[in-house]
Amino acid sequence: MRDAVTSTVPTLELDDIQSGALYERPTPYVGTYLLLRIDSRDDGRELVRRLHRIITPARSSPGPTAASITVAFTYAGLKALGVPQASLDSFVPEFQEGMAARAAILGDQGESSPEHWEKPLGTTDVHVAIAVLTSDLASLEAAADRARKAQEDLPGIEVVWRQDCYQLPTGRTSFGFKDGIGQPAVEGSGRAPSNPKEHPIKAGEIILGYPDETGAPPPMPTPEVLGRNGTYVVFRKLHTKVAAYRQYLRARAADRADEALLGAKMVGRWPSGAPLALSPSSDDPELGRDVHRHNDFGYADDPRGFKCPVGSHARRANPRDAFDHEGGVNVRLHRMIRRGTSYGPALPDNVLEDDGLDRGIMFVFAGAHPRRQFEFVKTQWLNDGIFIGAPAEKDPLVGPNDGSGSFTIPQHPVRRRLPDLPPFVVTRGGEYCFAPSLSAMRWLAELQT
Ligand code: HEM
């Protein structure tokens, strides 16, 4: 029996795959994201050769890593390295277009639109993205030093943007909630599912070159050495309006307990990470901490959302088994690996006035299908309410609200509706990238074009 199961699981080439996509970052963590521009093709290739030596392959990190370096390239970056046009054309269209060109589709409008993005995000100056994540400042300095050395003496390489990140002392993100709990397990990665009700997803959903949930391998960039064992990475710097969020809840809640309840209803989890599906009326920090229980749930027993609103952020982003009886949506085609981190200082507890500081999330997606995973979830499930039968409602926490939308909380005897939702999250910029395998890095470094 055991052999039969094992034989259907492809062997992932873990020494060729970058660890960042498959394995979680250290906890706690500190880190830095660097964006580089390649002005000289030769220097660019030398940079890739040096980065290849310091990348962490998945094989070497069977547990949470102490230090990990992940490298990814934009379309403009691959072009600057001299990747032949036929290969460039073989990448998925959204990667070729870049995130700024997809702004209208993604709901990046008004304050979030590319003309307001931090420069050079959304421009063709972003070529290489390097993420360095470690467990403490000393090892961050050492790892960042290795990354810096890779670009030293290369006048044709310019660092054009840097964003530091770190885990807040609370272990939570700026709105005050624990994040990063809901993740799919990937077949062949060696990681057990945190939700026993969800079988690991096929490796090809995340890593190119292996069958995905459709039974066939996803379309892969050519030549094979460039595409295989790579993954698409989407990053977005998302500013969070924490004071506005707190003021909104304070103004609508009956008392402090109600305020906490409304906040949890919007997210689908309590601040500790305890899911509403298992703890509908109050936070349960022990459950929030319990890695064996805090992701072990579905929504099938709560079709109308009395425990966890169907419009809450986490339920929209992963409706789990809620559609199992309807036969319409295969949720497994829309799963994603998230590798988000926090940036900026926490707004101290109980402060309701904005201090003007920038704080939020570096949202990072990894997957083989940016369109049917990241873009689908963002546009169909977070930005739109059609699939939950409330077309006018957007995600109450992260949706592109404009002050006119509402959020419905089903409850007895009458449902509750929170009106006039303002935007709580502003996009500061982002990009679609491709994190190649280690052999693809060698191929890129040795290009002769
Ligand atoms: C500033 C923006 C965001 C914040 C503050 C945020 C916060 C959270 C929190 C607190 C959770 C619950 C913890 C967990 O289940 O891991 C969560 C879950 C999740 N979020 Fe977000 N999120 C943001 C943006 C996004 C975006 C843009 C997407 C996708 C396009 C997304 C996709 C997800 C997914 C897939 C889950 C897991 C749901 C599950 O498996 O149950 N989030 N998020």
Image (cartoon, grey):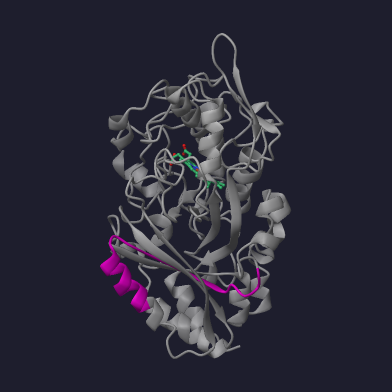
Position above or below: 297 against 62: above
- Relative image position of residue 350 (x, y in whole percent): 42, 38
Q: Residue furthest top?
A: 413
> Is 154 placed left or right of 127 in the picture?
left
Does residue 265 sit above or below 161 in this rendering?
Answer: above
Residue at 53% from the left image edge and 31% from the top image edge? 249
Q: Is residue 143 magenta?
A: yes
Is residue 109 in view from this perspective?
no
Image side of residue 109 versus residue 249, left or right: right
Quadrant containing the N terminus is top left
Q: Relative to 78, is 332 above or below?
A: above
Q: In this orientation, does residue 244 appear?
A: yes
Query: Is 292 situated left or right of 46 in this image?
Result: left
Which quarter of the picture shows residue 220? bottom right
Residue 180 located within the stretch drawn in magenta: no
Residue 401 sits in which quadrant? top right
Region of the chain picked out in magenta, as a range? 123-146
Picture quadrant where residue 222 is located: bottom right
Q: Residue 235: x percent and y percent?
A: 54, 59
Q: Could you tell me which residue is drawn at 35 percent across and 67 percent down? A: 15
Q: Quadrant of the C terminus?
A: bottom right
Q: In the image, residue 19 lies at what x, y percent?
A: 38, 62
Observer-nearest of 311 and 202: 311
Which residue is nearer to you in this view: 88 or 23? 23
